[in-house]
């Protein structure tokens, strides 16, 4: 890629470096005499150091004498504010895990279990949650019929004694449930050890608890959201805590958690600024929620056996009592007198989204607060005086040493600008060398900055052409070259193609042709034709530097070409060595991007190959896997381009578009596992072939049997006229019966019950088999016949039957699609037929609609299950993680009746809804389905309108599909002229309401 950038107005850095001395002399000759005066550098340094130390001492003394108290008080205010934030964060750390736990339990099966044994099967999960969060005092669930389950950890001996629990009790389970054999609601207490083995269980008639009467149940169910109670004292554990409750996912049961706030008191104990600092957390009623000594917070109520929270007045802390009497506003601090001593009081709000009115009261004795400050101030004064005495001689010595080494630093900076990192010896120099040092340091700073830009472009730019263009631009500027180009080896390796070019002078672009011969790469260190140009300046000859770009295994990758003026800054081996090292990083970047692009192209090709293979597998679905992505991508692109309407905010990054494209192309990849004879099943008796031929042959046998019977009776002397009449009637009946069976074999819209009864009657006719039916069978057929007794020959067989060998049971490959299957880790929710296949003749001929049995229908629907399973097993990178979901959700419906996971509208993304519409529209309009004629546009959109009303298709997506005209563009490309009839879009939109 060519890059043309404006040349900078400043002179090239190399020119600055080359002309440093001359420029300095020339500029000095034009300066006024007072600016040409110089002084020794050591004198300047010593004077500055001494003056600065004197000023610093004076300012320090002034600051110490006037603002020490204000500073420490301000610091205490900031510390108090940080303490408030720490306490608020601690509250969040206490409550948030319980919040996450109760949200998870809302979806746990224990919320939907209807019996006590079913709930106890979830006991390990509840016990694990209690074990992981030691602040949880109990977890409980209330059910709409009054049943109740509570699990409480017994974490100490005092609680075990209080509960009168057996030794080794780790968990107490309290339940109210209907139990088999017992009348009414039964209250039961069960004790479990740490391994959840039952120690004891007893019915407690006195235990009567109806959760529906409790505020945590009623409020959560009424508001249909999570409820958080005010802090109170737990009756059982005597801890200060709160209760969280939330309805279950279906909104019937209510889950609750008791969360202890005991650690909050221990937390604030460690946050004291001074040993005697008093801190308390109070609510809006001035009840103490947390105090370093939590035993003082609880007060035994004389009227009830339980405990209650002590008010601040009853806490017995004079400083906090006096602070309360001041009535401070939030964030205000004030000095106060308490117990004969001065205190600094502060009131801070406790930021919490859940509780309102919580405050942190803090009282600090000012004597302790300022004691350390006074000592530090005295130490600082003495330290400052000592430093002044020490820095007076050191400043003089430092000035002399810096002056001697300054010239050496300038030489080293020049070497760095020439990419020579050796450390030169430093010599004493006059002060004027400071100007040279400043210019060199500026040049070095610019160079480093440009190298950082090169590194940034290499790592951040994903497109190879843009990366090469940006890196070349920065490299030319950083190295003070006149221009450069990057060439890459062409695919046939016959030459080099220019990939990027940059020249400071646009007129020099012709010096970098678009194509170079491979000899430039092979002989990169030797002069080549075209190196010298007729416009080159003879006084400053241009040099050409070529550096090979190779892969990590040494394969030719490209060539970096730089042109520069041969001068003292670049005419050495250090410049070449530096460019060669930098080219290694550039080679790795080019190779990496080439590999990524190649892998992406390979992945796209494999996916298209798979889609084409699926389309080629069956003539009934030819082109489906190609047309659906075309339609889905076109619709999604229109949505992203919409400026108004419901999809105005829809936007997709390039990575998201690629993810959607892959999901669309792979939406039917599971069809590679679908049997062709089921996908292509055009008649009811069709398997790998149409079994109507077997039935016809049986009718032929009955026809022959009728003729044989006729001749046998004719020889016996029976009336020939009657025999002839009976033979003709029998033949006519057989013809009618077979025609009827043949009609039943062709799938229709509906088959009446009378036809099914007649079919069974026809099937009861007997024909005689004279050959062994177990010869020439496969191992699988013989296995199905293993339990069927062998019948002696000749055997009478019904004309049509459902035989045991027609039933194929599920084997080891039974798909895990049922909701309760432990192996179902994909969330499938489908009804699994009892058999893998049912080939019974009556069973298949009795299909009332179409040609597919329930087993056949499941086999076809199973393709989406296999799609999700197959794609979920692939290691997609994070930016393609949603490919399995996009590919596997196009048979879901908004009302939750789709498959394979019965997802409902809130669970379906916009990509899922677009894929669903594209798949349906393509299937309705496809002209390559031999079992049905293609539908016109009007017929297809009418059917889809009905599906919108039935909540099978998203209404907004369908409206946008109509108004955007995507259907019209698709019809022009893929539909026959006969299908493209007139469409009244406004009428369809009006019918949707």
Image (cartoon, rainbow, N blue to C red):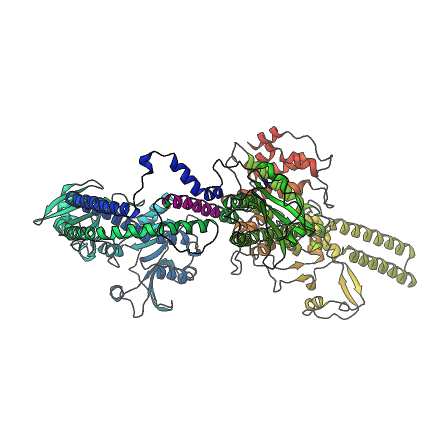
Residue 451 forms part of the magenta stretch: yes
Residue 941 x, y percent position in the rendering: 64, 36
- Front residue of 181/433: it is 433
Percent x, y for residue 455?
49, 49
Judge from the rendering whether residue 116 lies leftward or rightward of residue 787; answer left or right. left
- Most prominent secondary structure in the magenta stretch? helix
Residue located farthest toward the left when viewing the structure as drawn: 340
Q: Of 160 and 600, which appears nearest the observer?
A: 600
The answer to whether residue 851 is left or right of residue 85 is right
Place residue 835 in its image quadrant: bottom right
Residue 358 visible to an observer of this rendering = no
Q: Quadrant of the C terminus?
A: top right
On screen, residue 460 above or below 646: below
Identify the image quadrant of residue 136.
bottom left
Q: Nearer the viewer, residue 418 or 377?
A: 418
Asked if the stretch drawn in magenta spans residue 215, the answer is no
Q: Which residues are magenta?
A: 434-452
What residue is shown at x 86% (from left), y 54% (from top)?
A: 726
Q: Position of residue 307 (x, y in %)?
A: 20, 55
Instruction: Count all numbered tags in the image, as a single digit.
Output: 0
Question: In the visual, does 129 lie left or right of 499?
Answer: left
Please identify the quadrant where the N terminus is shown.
Answer: top right
Q: Position of residue 110 (x, y in %)?
A: 42, 56
């Amino acid at each position: 890629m060519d890059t043309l950038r404006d040349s900078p107005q400043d002179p090239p850095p190399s020119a600055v470096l080359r002309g440093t001395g001359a420029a300095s002399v020339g500029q000095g000759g034009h300066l006024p005499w007072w600016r040409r005066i110089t002084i020794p550098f050591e004198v300047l340094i010593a004077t500055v150091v001494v003056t600065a130390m004197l000023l610093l001492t004076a300012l320090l003394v002034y600051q110490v004498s006037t603002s020490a108290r204000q500073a420490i008080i301000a610091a205490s205010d900031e510390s108090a504010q940080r303490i408030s934030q720490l306490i608020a964060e601690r509250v969040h750390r206490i409550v948030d895990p319980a919040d996450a736990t109760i949200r998870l339990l809302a979806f746990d099966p224990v919320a939907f279990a209807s019996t006590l044994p079913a709930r106890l099967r979830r006991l390990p999960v509840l016990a694990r949650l209690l074990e992981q969060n030691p602040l949880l005092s109990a977890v409980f669930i209330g059910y709409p019929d009054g049943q109740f389950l509570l699990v409480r950890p017994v974490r100490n001996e005092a609680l075990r004694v209080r509960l009168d629990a057996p030794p080794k009790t780790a968990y107490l389970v309290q339940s109210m449930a209907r139990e088999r054999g017992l009348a009414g609601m039964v209250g039961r207490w069960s004790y479990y050890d740490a391994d959840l083995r039952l120690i004891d269980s007893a019915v407690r008639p006195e235990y009567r608890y109806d959760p529906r009467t409790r505020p945590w149940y009623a409020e959560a169910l009424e508001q249909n959201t999570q409820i958080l109670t005010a802090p109170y004292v737990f009756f059982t554990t005597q801890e200060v805590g709160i209760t969280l409750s939330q309805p279950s996912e279906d909104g019937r049961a209510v889950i609750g958690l008791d969360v202890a706030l005991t650690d909050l008191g221990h937390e604030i104990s460690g946050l004291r600024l001074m040993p005697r600092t008093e801190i308390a957390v109070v609510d809006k009623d001035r009840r103490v929620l947390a105090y370093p000594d939590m035993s003082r917070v609880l007060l035994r109520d004389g009227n009830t056996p339980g405990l209650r929270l002590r008010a601040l007045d009853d806490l017995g802390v004079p400083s906090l009592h006096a602070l309360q009497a001041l009535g401070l506003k939030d964030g205000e601090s004030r000095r106060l007198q308490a117990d004969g001593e001065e205190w600094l009081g502060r009131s801070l709000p406790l930021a919490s989204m859940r509780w309102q009115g919580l405050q942190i009261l803090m009282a600090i004795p000012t004597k302790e607060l300022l004691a350390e400050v006074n000592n530090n101030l005295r130490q600082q004064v003495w330290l400052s005086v000592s430093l002044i005495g020490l820095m007076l001689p050191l400043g003089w010595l430092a000035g002399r040493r810096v002056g001697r080494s300054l010239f050496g630093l300038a030489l080293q900076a020049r070497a760095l600008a020439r990419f020579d990192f050796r450390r030169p010896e430093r010599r004493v120099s006059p002060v004027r060398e400071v100007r040279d040092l400043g210019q060199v340091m500026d040049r070095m700073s610019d160079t480093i900055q440009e190298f950082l830009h090169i590194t940034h472009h290499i790592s951040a730019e994903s497109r190879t052409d843009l990366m090469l263009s940006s890196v070349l631009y920065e490299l030319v500027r950083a190295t003070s070259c006149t221009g450069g180009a990057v060439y890459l080896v062409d695919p046939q390796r016959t030459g080099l193609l220019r990939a990027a070019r940059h020249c400071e002078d646009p007129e020099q672009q012709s010096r970098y042709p678009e194509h170079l011969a491979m000899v430039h790469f092979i002989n990169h260190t030797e002069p080549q034709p075209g190196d010298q140009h007729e416009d080159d300046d003879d006084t400053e000859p241009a040099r050409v530097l070529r550096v090979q770009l190779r892969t990590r295994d040494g394969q030719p990758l490209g060539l970096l070409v730089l042109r520069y003026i041969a001068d003292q800054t670049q005419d050495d081996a250090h410049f070449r060595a530096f460019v060669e090292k930098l080219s290694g990083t550039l080679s790795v970047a080019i190779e990496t991007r080439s590999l990524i692009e190649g892998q992406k192209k390979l992945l796209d090709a494999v996916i298209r190959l798979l889609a084409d293979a699926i389309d080629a597998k069956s003539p009934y679905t030819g082109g489906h896997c190609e047309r659906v992505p075309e339609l889905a991508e076109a619709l999604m692109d229109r949505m992203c381009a919409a400026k108004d309407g419901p999809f105005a905010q829809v936007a997709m990054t390039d990575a998201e578009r690629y993810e959607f494209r892959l999901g669309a192309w792979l939406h039917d990849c599971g069809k590679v596992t679908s049997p062709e004879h089921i996908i292509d099943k055009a008649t009811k008796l069709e398997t790998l072939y149409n079994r109507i031929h077997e039935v016809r042959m049986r009718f032929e046998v009955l026809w022959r049997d009728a003729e044989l019977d006729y001749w046998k009776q004719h020889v016996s002397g029976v009336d020939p006229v009657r025999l002839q009449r009976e033979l003709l009637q029998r033949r006519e009946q057989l013809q009618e019966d077979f025609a009827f069976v043949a009609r039943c074999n062709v799938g229709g819209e509906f088959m009446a019950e009378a036809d099914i009864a007649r079919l069974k009657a026809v099937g009861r006719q007997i024909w005689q088999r004279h050959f062994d039916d177990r010869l020439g069978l496969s191992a699988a057929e013989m296995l199905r016949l293993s339990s069927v007794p062998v019948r002696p020959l000749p055997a009478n067989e019904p004309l049509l039957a459902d035989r045991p060998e027609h039933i194929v049971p599920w084997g080891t490959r039974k798909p895990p699609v049922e909701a309760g299957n432990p192996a179902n880790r994909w969330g499938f929710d489908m009804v699994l037929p009892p058999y893998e296949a049912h080939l019974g003749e009556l069973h298949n001929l009795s299909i009332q609609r179409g040609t597919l049995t329930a087993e056949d229908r499941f086999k076809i629907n199973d393709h989406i299950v296999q799609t999700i399973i197959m794609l979920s097993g692939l290691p997609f990178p994070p930016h393609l993680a949603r490919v399995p979901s996009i590919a596997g959700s196009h048979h879901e419906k908004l009302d939750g009746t789709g498959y394979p996971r019965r997802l409902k509208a809130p669970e379906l993304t916009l990509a899922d809804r677009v894929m669903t519409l594209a798949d349906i529209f393509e299937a309705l309009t496809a002209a390559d389905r031999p079992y049905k004629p293609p539908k016109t546009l009007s017929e297809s959109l009418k059917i889809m309108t009905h599906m919108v009303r039935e909540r099978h298709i998203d209404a907004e997506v369908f409206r946008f599909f109509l108004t955007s005209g995507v259907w019209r563009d698709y019809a022009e490309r893929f539909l026959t002229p006969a299908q493209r009839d007139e469409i009244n879009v406004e009428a369809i939109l009006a019918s949707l309401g």
